[in-house]
Image: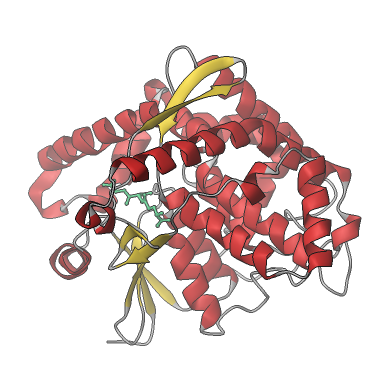
Amino acid sequence: MGKDYILYGMQASLFTGKARAYMRRNRIPVIERGAGHPEFMSRVYPHMQRFIMPVIETPGGEIIQDGTDILEYLEGQGLGREPLFPENPVVKAVSLLFQLFGNEGLLRPAMHYRWNFDDDNLDFLKVSFRDVMPLEFGVKANDAGFENASGRMRKAAKAFGVFDKTIPLVEESYAEFLSLFSNHLAGSYYLLGDRPTIGDYGLFNPLYAHLARDPKPAFLMKTSAPLVWNWVERMNRPEATEEHTLVDPQTGLYEGDAIPETLTDLMTYIGQEYAAEFSAHVDFTDNWLEEQGDNPEKVKAPLGRGIGFSAFEWRGIEMSSVVMPYRFYLAQKLWDHFDACSEEDQTSIRNLFSQTGLDVFLDKRPSRRVLRKDYHEVWGD
Ligand SMILES: N[C@@H](CCC(=O)N[C@@H](CS)C(=O)NCC(=O)O)C(=O)O
């Protein structure tokens, strides 16, 4: 085993983006392999009992799956060259909120702009998906493999709520996001100042592989939101770069009471966009858990991606989306931080979250915790 890390993923994979960007930014020596690499198929996949990326293999042979777990692991090893989590408790809470929303709240535009513009995107995607196809089987197998993978992803788009009826709203909502994020990036290079934190890495997932890389949305982003494209490029540079500071030169980040209005506008957007959906998912989950009763086997079994569908109101219409316990795993990061804060800091966080319509993300919690065990999500107590 050499001394480099190995990252299994692919350029077109949404969740690989975060791990790759972090490793680049922190100059962690890494070799990337497509998730169709023989070592992945013969060793890593059977070990995890799950076909999923990103995965890293450490120089010591440890295998870690999940973008968030990978960043936390690498940070825990002292490999971060700058703190991933802001020190200021209020700014940290904001960063953790954006981790959740970035990871999970922009999946509708990501899936829509990838899978509903075949004339622009399809040839490009077919080539990109070769990273997960066993090349030795030749072009025909690649085509069949792509049909299979893209068929599943098109279904996933529907599961996240992309339907004929919602498409105009998905586009409207994404345009609003681009405009708000652009306004904000006029005042700092990253979400919370002049260096990225965990919130940027969360946002990077949908904003890179799908929305900045696929032909149709790449054109949209470059032409309608060049500052966002510039942020994506910055987040993903393989060479180290140093920004000249637009904010506090001591920390490189905004301080809690100096959060600019452009950021509170973005937070308000998250409240309008995602709070009702998140809240409905918590209610659904609590009912689901109750229905399992005291059947310990069911409640202890590894969870797949979704446990059902839940309805909620979004932009004036009734719609539904898949309930994924993984989202609570990310929300717990915010809750654990909040619960560990002093009363004074809790009050400051609560004031900011209330002012921006985000109380749900502090208060609405399912009755059980979500843990990750053996590469799967499971319920905790
Ligand atoms: N929460 C996971 C999500 C990983 C995930 O969904 N990865 C997708 C690719 S972006 C995947 O592996 N899909 C494979 C499949 O569904 O077959 C993480 O952050 O690592």
- Considering every residue shown, the one lying at the far left of the view is 137
Quadrant of the frame with the C terminus: bottom left
Q: Residue at x 37, y 60 (%)?
A: 54
* Left or right relative to 4: residue 39: left
Percent position of residue 40, x then y: 21, 65
Quarter of the rendering containing residue 371:
bottom left
Q: Residue at x 51, y 56 (%)?
A: 330
Total numbered badges shown on the rendered structure? 0
Q: Report the front residue among 366 and 193.
A: 366
Quarter of the rendering containing residue 345:
bottom right
Percent position of residue 49, x then y: 18, 61
Q: Report the front residue among 298 and 127.
A: 298
Percent position of residue 200, x then y: 64, 55
- Considering every residue shown, the one lying at the far front of the view is 294
Percent position of residue 356, x then y: 78, 40
Quadrant of the frame with the N terminus: bottom left
Q: Is residue 194 visible?
A: no
* Left or right relative to 204: residue 164: left
